[in-house]
Image (cartoon, rainbow, N blue to C red):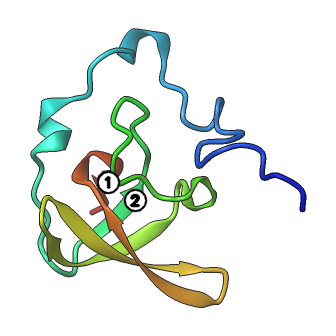
Amino acid sequence: MAKRIGGTRRKTRRLFKKNVRQRGKFSIGRYLQKFEPGDKVLLKADPTFQKALYHPRLHGVLGTVQKKRGFCYEVKIKDIKKKKILIIHPVHLVKVD
């Protein structure tokens, strides 16, 4: 058997990179933001906070908040033709009006 090379953040150097002036600690406002069930959200990863992060293929996808689960939220998305539910921290979500 061949050994698997790379981890969960493989080939994401440019995808998850922040602007030079925004590097460092994450925003406390984004960390503490609240969502209601039915809110539309955009999946936008914050590279400074690596917990409850989704697969890099789903970066920039729109989803709907289903419910709160602990500190995170269940977000329903459509990946190609299949509907999926992801558990994502609010740092990685941006509300879309």
Instruction: Give how far apart the Cα atoms at labels 2 and 1 are.
Output: 6 Å
Q: Is residue 43 above or below residue 69?
A: above
Q: Which mark is residue 73?
A: none
Question: Which of the 4 image quarters holds residue 68?
Answer: bottom left
Q: Which mark is residue 42?
A: 2
Please report the residue visible at 34 percent of the width from the left and 49 percent of the height from the top. 92
- For image coordinates 71% across by 43% down, the residue present is 6
Q: Position of residue 41 (x, y in %)?
A: 33, 64
Residue under label 1:
93
- Position of 16 with respect to 32 (left or right) is right
> From the viewer's perspective, is 41 left or right of 34?
right
Image quadrant for the C terminus? bottom left
**What kind of element bears circle 1?**
strand
Labels 2 and 1 touching (C-beta < 8 A): yes
How far across and down, in percent of the image, does residue 47 sit? 43, 33
Name the residue located 47 percent from the left edge and 58 percent from the top edge.
54
Quarter location, residue 27: top left
